[in-house]
Image: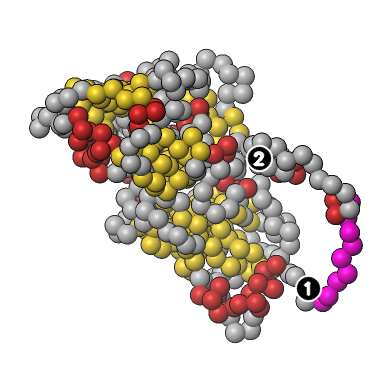
Amino acid sequence: MKDLVPAAGNGLYDRRAFLRGGAALAAAMTGYSVKAETLTDPVWSNEPGTLVPPYGTPSKYEKGVVRTLSNPDFEPRNSHARTPHHLLHGTVTPNGLHFTISHGGNAEIDPAQHRLAIHGLVKRPLVFTAEALMRYPTVSRFTFVECGGNSAPMFSPEPIQASVQALHGLASCAEWTGVPLSTLLEETGIDPKAKWVIAEGADSQRLSRSVPLAKIMDDAMVALFQNGERVMPGQGYPMRLLLPGWEGNMNVKWLRRLELAEQPAMSYYESRTYSQILPNGKAFRFYFIQEVKSYITRPSFGVELKGPGFYEISGVAYSGNGKITKVMVSADGGKSWAEAALQEPVNSKSFTRFRAPWEWNGGPAVLQSRAWDDQGNVQPTRADFVAKRGEAAKVPSPLAFPNQHFNSITSWAIDANGGVRHVYA
């Protein structure tokens, strides 16, 4: 390790350390011994295992890797299930851990009875069954879905002491497979007057959102599969709208209707619930794209360090505008920075895993990450973000609580005992 020099303050190395360090870096970080040891045969090596189930489930020793539920008693309100980012690695979220938000529970829909209608300003209205859509050519896209309200606790004037799951757990990433909506609309024939598509779900809330036709014709799809298997009920079984990079609420689940129109519908969910109030009292009419963002998942709140030494700082970055091109990591609260390594593949509008080696000396540290995308967008500092968007204590009224599209830097403070707190730095 003597040939490696930290690239930033407080013992932080940059991505080149992974290339130059080789086995020496791995040994320092993992603490493995090169001395040969004799292995003993544990119980499981001397007796048959358990029955192989028809559908695989995680090991019993991973029972703590689950989503947290905001409405476990199923009261008549929204239900949130948050992804445990601090317990996951890589970039693909398992289907059972993918976040969900349901405004009226998960609709249980018989795919044989479900229909998708495309009508309005089209030359030939059409109705599709799920089976009929299966006959069309499909495409697959790795993309994240993020609730517009993900990271809303970060609007608090004081840092809330909560895990990355509680702060950022309403975002997940998967491989989605389905039929491009451009294919279906070309079959119906688009009236030149059409500029918007109003998407409606088949759930009891009849959730609907208006989507610009240009987005629909670009990369939207009717998603039928998630990570290779049929989408689950909480993801909109038997079909959902997928709008890569755009606000999660617009990715209408249990999709049953697409109406082409000249103007947006200005429905409840787009004219009130998802219209962000600014410090000057004005509101965004629409806010579609989930902007460039990153956060460190390990170490993070609830994941303590076990004494000084080498650790890998790891997290996820993503942008609704395109690919992540760079992530910088700091261990001293933004005073100095080192460039993290990006794990391949780096896909557009998808989670990108970043990693950086760090030698913790046992003293105070503040970990941060900051991301850039290929459109030149950079993740804002919290000070810059709050100046433009406000925080909970500075809005005109309780009805104007700003709780959408928070994407500024997250900071984790490490104390001498290895404990981790959420701080603003």
Give the amino acid at mark 2: Gly
Q: Is residue 267 above or below residue 391?
A: above
How far is the residue under mark 2 from the one under mark 1?
34 Å
Q: Secondary structure at mark 2?
A: loop
Q: Is residue 39 magenta?
A: yes
Quadrant hosting residue 307: bottom right
Where is the N terminus found, in terms of image quarters?
bottom right
Q: Is residue 281 magenta?
A: no
Image coordinates of residue 52 in percent, x first then y, are: 73, 41
Image coordinates of residue 225 in percent, x first then y, are: 45, 38
Q: As drawn, which residue projects farthest toward the left? A: 192
Q: Which residue is mark 1?
A: 33
User: Would residue 147 appear left or right of 422 to someone viewing this image?
Assistant: left
Q: Is residue 291 above or below residue 353?
A: above
Question: Which disc, if any, is residue 56?
Answer: 2
Question: Which disc, if any, is residue 135?
Answer: none
Which residue is pictured at 51% across the width and 31% down the height? 232
Q: Which residues are magenta?
A: 35-43
Q: Is residue 236 above or below residue 109?
A: below
Q: Earlier in the sequence, mark 2 or mark 1?
A: 1
Which residue is pictured at 55% across the width and 36% down the height? 82
Which residue is pictured at 52% across the width and 15% down the height? 76
Give the colouring mode of the picture: secondary structure
On the question of residue 315 being in view, the answer is: yes
Image coordinates of residue 317 in percent, x first then y, are: 45, 53
Image coordinates of residue 213 in percent, x first then y, are: 21, 35
